[in-house]
Image (cartoon, rainbow, N blue to C red):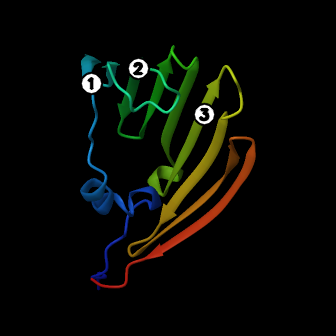
Amino acid sequence: AASAYVNPGPFEQAIGEGKRFFMLDTFDGFRCDINKQASPFMLVLHNFWLGTSMLPDGRTSTYSFVTQVADEAGFMMARWDPGQASVNGRVHRALLGGLAMGKLQIGVSAEGQNDTLLGEVDFGGHSWMGNLRYGSMGGGVVLGCNYMQALTP
């Protein structure tokens, strides 16, 4: 007999609905995203934000270049911000024939104080989801374990 309970999904998406409701995407100034699908699997994006007072480092404008490559087994993303002299990247790949999802998050900057290297593995069953993570963020070690269980069908 099939279980009426549903897998709760990845841990980082657990508060997604509430976040979309309470954290609206508001901004000042002029913001423009230009994206182009370079192939069926690749997207490139240019992001401009001009005349803003919302950037935490006091700048009034920013530009970033993002590229994403995706297929059935996962995706890879890289972001370059010349104003902050930083490069960020993510890799998500299916592991063990789709039984688990491996994730790698990398971020490097000129200052080096907020550099990131974080590895994660998501795994689950019909009604539960688990997550293990280990890495370094902002000079500190990150070690985590999460478990979510569906309680109602």
Left or right: 71, with 84 as reference point = left
Residue 54, given in percent of the width and then of the height, sits at 39, 33
Q: Nearer the N terminus, badge 1 or badge 3?
A: 1
How far apart are labels 1 and 3 at the CA level? 30 Å
State the SS at label 1: loop
What's the amino acid at mark 1? Answer: Gly
Q: Nearer the viewer, mark 1 or mark 3?
A: 1
Q: Residue 140 location in percent, x, y?
A: 74, 47
Name the residue: 53% across, 52% down: 96
Q: Which residue is mark 3?
A: 106
In the rendered image, the quadrant that contains the N terminus is bottom left
Q: Are marks 3 and 2 in contact (CB under 8 Å)?
A: no
Question: Between residues 5 and 49, which one lies in front from this camera angle?
Answer: 49
> Residue 6 is drawn in which quadrant?
bottom left
Residue 125 drawn above or below residue 99: below
The picture places residue 42, in percent across and down from the top left corner, at 33, 22
Query: Gap in Å between the C-alphas at discs 3 and 2?
Result: 26 Å
Nearer the observer, 81 or 29: 29
Name the residue beneath numbered marker 1.
Answer: 29
Looking at the rendered structure, which numbered label has been put on residue 60?
2
- Which of the labelled discs sits on residue 123, or is there none? none
Is mark 2 in CB contact (under 8 Å) with mark 1? yes
Indicate the position of residue 125 as horizontal and vertical percent values. Answer: 44, 70
* Numbered label tally: 3
Element on which disc 3 rests: strand
Left or right: 47, with 76 as reference point? left
Secondary structure type for disc 2: loop
